[in-house]
Amino acid sequence: MWFSFWRPRDRFSLDELRYLTDQLQKVRIINEVNKDFVVEALRSIAELITYGDQHDSSFFDFFMEKQVMGEFVRMLQMSKSMIISLQILQTLSIMIQNLRTEHAIYYMFSNEYINFLITYKFDFRNEELLSYYMSFLRAISGKLNKNTISLLVKTQNEDIVSFPLYVEAIRYAFHEESMIRTAVRALTLNVYHVGDGPVNRFVSKAPYDGYFSDLISFFRKQCIDLNGLVSEIPQKTEPDRTTAILAAVDEIEDNLYYFSDVISAGIPDVGRLITDNILQLLILPLLLPSLRLDALKESPIGPVTSLYLLCCILRIVKIKDLSNAIAAALFCPLEAFLPYAEPKVNGHVTNGNCHESHHQLENNNAAVDEQLGVTTELSTSHVYPEDVTKDILLSYVVSGNSQLVMGSLNVLATLLQTKAELDEAMLDALGILPQRKQHKKLLLQALVGEGLGEEQLFSPESCSTKDGISNEIGGYLQRLKEDYGVACSSSEFGKSSRTHRFQVLDALVSLFCRPGVPAEILWDGGWLLRQLLPYSEAEFNSQHLKLLKDSYRDCCNALVKETRGTWPDLLVTVLSDEWKKCKRAIEASSPRKEPKCILLPLQKSSSDDVHNDSSVSYGEKMCEQVKVFVLLHQLQIFCLGRALPEQPPFYPPADTPGASRARTAGIDGSIPKPGTELRLVDTVPCRIAFERGKERHFSFLAISIGTSGWILLLEEFPQKQQYGVVRVTAPLAGSSPRIDEKHPKWLHLRIRPSTLPFVDSGRPAALGTPRKAKPKTLVDGRWTLAFRDEESCKYALSMLLEEIDLQSNEVERRLRPMLNLDEPPATETHFGPPSASSSTVTSTSSTT
């Protein structure tokens, strides 16, 4: 009966808040006895204040009246227990994140309790406590605006003299734990994007402007570490190495996006600081000099990594002055960057831990600078006589290894795509201003009455520039000289933009004629060429056209050989597929691959092994040859001024002659599957053992229908004479028939797979990207057929060779429109792949 007088309190009630507050005020010491109660009380108060902020304002009125924030501070000062510190930071983080009313936020920030907690000397040897502390700071920054930020700073003569939230946060900007660094970046971005003038001046002046130079120094070390992963002799398996590179790439690109977000806040001095430090600490002393190994043998970054980083900086960090300064520096000789071998830091060093982090970064950079750079396959000779940086890029296109070619093309493509930041005059001077933009520029000059523009527009050499360097470029070059001590090559600007343009075209044409370069890299060059010359051959000289035509003829001859090779039955299908892919690739608005593909190890196919004689190896070579042929064919159409068709031109399938073996056997054109009933005409009896000790008797028949062909093994029908049932089928192409030298009654055949794995799946993995799963390895089968006598064996061999010849002739006939561009397409040209598909998989083509 007495329990009826004790009514339980509602958990989300003002009485509960009053009770918890009253109990906290009674606490005079925190020990093992009451520690758990204090922790639970702090947690419950956070829940109640959050609830009251959304449902009942009297909750927060009580919180203010009783100065509960002061009780939090008292609990922190009273306790030596780590768990109390953790709970107070968590409680305040939850409250600040969930408070919605401006009244509540103003109260939380308007007293000195928040700044006291920010500057409190926590014991951060406990990593968990540091994580809670950074979450607390980040929660505060999430509520900043032009009104609330003034509550957290101290001013003197309208200048901020103290901003603990920002100062304490950047002490941990380069902490080894990535989550801490992420929290600091989120906080600083919240500060920058408030747009408060005094705060902007505070963060961009001494001593706190040193934070930005420290950022670039930290980023520089990450770049050097990335190069170590890229250039080291592989000690891990390729997937593990690729995973490590991709993780480092993600970290680097996250940093660059952070720079971009900082710049987007629109603080002019901060944009200038980032630009100056990127140039002084990274671009001029490290990236540009490392493009040529014999210029700086001990560069800590190799050319491949440097090319990737240049692409990323131009693509992500959207600063006009930075983009144009990098482009202008490409006109400078490598010797001009030598004074920057020991970079000087721009700005002052911040106080506290940030100063220690910067000092450590300097030591780390000095230590890493003693490492040797990455070796490459490129010889030290170049096709361009001067050491101007942009010419070194072109020399890599002409004579570099695959990664250097891909990297240089990516840099040129990135410069071309940097439309908003890079001046058109700079693109024109580099020789990569698209032709349509050139015409637009000259037409505008002619319309406004500039005689030079009208003269150039209607002259045969419409792209030449008689004034040499433009005023815009001159300004950037002058700044490089005055601010950074880097002088350009004066001889470069005695040349017209047309000369620079022809240098780029020379390099691209040379690339298309190079043997051994992966086809997908050539497609990247094709994309760049189409961007520069979207209309016709007008910019090509006779030497360009001759080189392209000679290379195209070589590819035509190689393709004709493929009609007599291992995979003629797939040629039409592969050509049709690769045609559409290549057309999409070179007509796309942007390159297909991201810059990080430059860094990843190139995939090794089975065709790279010169001792590999498998049919799959030949198939990979065939597909690679087709890709090169398709690109050169499309370039030839482009040079002839013709429109590029959606599908490649093929002759339609020919009708199967009535006297052919396929017709005689009763095949109607479909694939002869096991179980199909056929007439036993022109077949040869044979024996074969698919298992040891189990010899079987069959009738052997080879047939071809159009571009397809099969080897058939049939069993006779006991009830139906002259008829048999197909038991085993195998592809005719690639069978490589031969009679055994010691046993003239034996016929050896290679049985290749019916199709290629990457043709079935649509396409192989993109160049420079890791495979998600290891594909099945298809291997060749081997048959040995035993015939009754030598004559039967020779007849079976002649049957095979005859049908193989018929199949190859049909493939070559269908491809004829693609092999002769000098004549207009014939009226019987058919667009698209054949309707018949490849033959079925045989039981002896094993898969592992």
Image: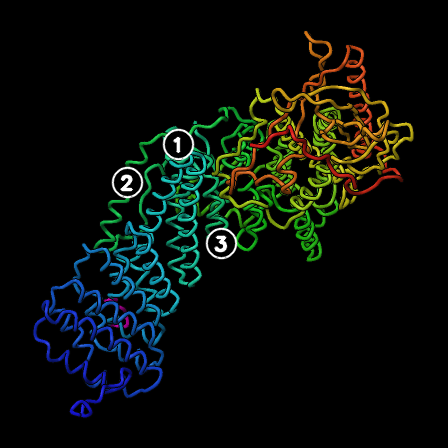
Q: CA distance from mark 2 to mark 1?
A: 19 Å
The residue to which callout 3 is attached is 320
Looking at the image, tell me whether mark 2 or mark 1 is earlier in sequence order.
1
Q: According to the image, label 1 marks what residue?
A: 232
On the image, which quarter does residue 306 sit in? top left
* Residue under numbered circle 2: 364
Q: Earlier in the sequence, mark 3 or mark 2?
A: 3
Report the residue at 43% width, 63% height from top.
266
User: Which quadrant of the figure has residue 667?
Assistant: top right
Camera-near label (3 vs 2) is 2
Report helix, strand or loop for mark 1: loop
Work out whether residue 604 can be spotted. yes
| Vertical relation: 25 (above or below) 310 | below
Packing grade of label 2 (10 A; few <14, some 14-19, many >=20) is: some
Residue 820: % across, % down:
81, 31
Where is residue 260 shown, x and y percent of the image? 44, 56
Please name the residue shown 67% across and 43% down the image: 581
**Residue 539 counted in the magenta span:** no
For the record, the magenta segment spans 157-163
* Mark 3, secondary structure of its residue: helix
